[in-house]
Image (spheres, rainbow, N blue to C red):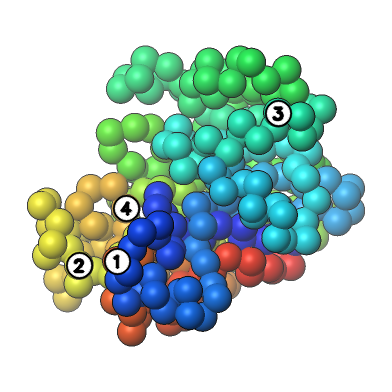
Amino acid sequence: MEVTLLGAGDTTGTPTIGCSCDTCESARERGVERSRFSVHVRNERTDESLLIDASPDLRSQFATRDVPLPDAAVVTHIHFDHLDGLGNVYRLLRELPVYAASETDPKTDESVAETVRRKYDYLDALSVHPTEPFETVSICGLRVTLVRVTHPPLLCYGLAVEDPATGGKLSITGDTSYDVPQRSRDVLADPDLCLADALVPASLCEHHPLGGDHHDEAGTPRTFGTKHMTREGALSLAAELGAAETRLVHAAHFYPVEEAFEEPIALDGERYTL
């Protein structure tokens, strides 16, 4: 399977609109971008494509990357930067099955699948397929398994995507703190490629009102506040999962400019064959 990282950024993306910080200015000078998070997975055997999360930047992502339009989509959670691109289905696709978790979120009193159905009930092309976490489903000829992660206050999911023919495996942590349940870690384990949420470096936890959490033995916080992993936390989790290759995603423009473009922090347009 061919994996294209359409969007490697966080809620505002990099460069952020109206921001003249050193990191945003450097991104403009370099001609690089981290748009809102989205991943394209193409199954070469069936010539089908799966979209993981529908970025608000969906139009520009597909206009600038040589990838086919999706045959199906997975939505990990209901935050706008992962969901609102679904509106682009209008007049663009005749049909798009959307897979999303079926369990009810106590915070919203509906599942991710129900939220997607309610928000986009005007889109005839869109059909919603409630999916039980930890139950593997076949989508575009690939084996897809949603797993619970920890991104309070909402229920949020990561996922594993496996090619049953080649054994290639992609693991995506989704938006999460370092506190990923062991059952989920077991599903995500041993990927050829891990896309790990790494909002900021651990050094910035001193600026968060809640500080950092899930410290390692050296005292380095692996969670920024309560919702996202630090760079150090993401690298720790990927190592514990046994990832053959790791790319850090959902990166904010708050990275100091001297660190913002260092490996393995991903940029839009990266492509991998698993």
**Which dot, 2 or 1, sits closer to the camera?**
1
- Give the SS element for disc 1: loop
The residues bearing labels 3 and 1 have C-alpha atoms spaced at a distance of 34 Å
Label 1 Cα crowd, 10 Å radius (few <14 / some 14-19 / many 20+): some
Q: Give coordinates of residue 240: x percent, y percent.
A: 42, 66
In the rendered image of this protein, does residue 178 appear above or below residue 93? below
Disc 4 residue type? His
- Disc number for residue 10: none
- Disc number for residue 228: 4
Disc 3 residue type? Tyr
In this rendering, position of residue 90 left or right of residue 103: right
**Which dot, 3 or 1, sits closer to the camera?**
3
Which residue is labeled 3 in the image? 90
Q: Earlier in the sequence, mark 4 or mark 2?
A: 2
In the rendered image of this protein, does residue 81 appear above or below residue 127? below
- Residue in view at x 77 percent, y 56 percent: 67
Between 77 and 69, the one lying in front of the other is 69
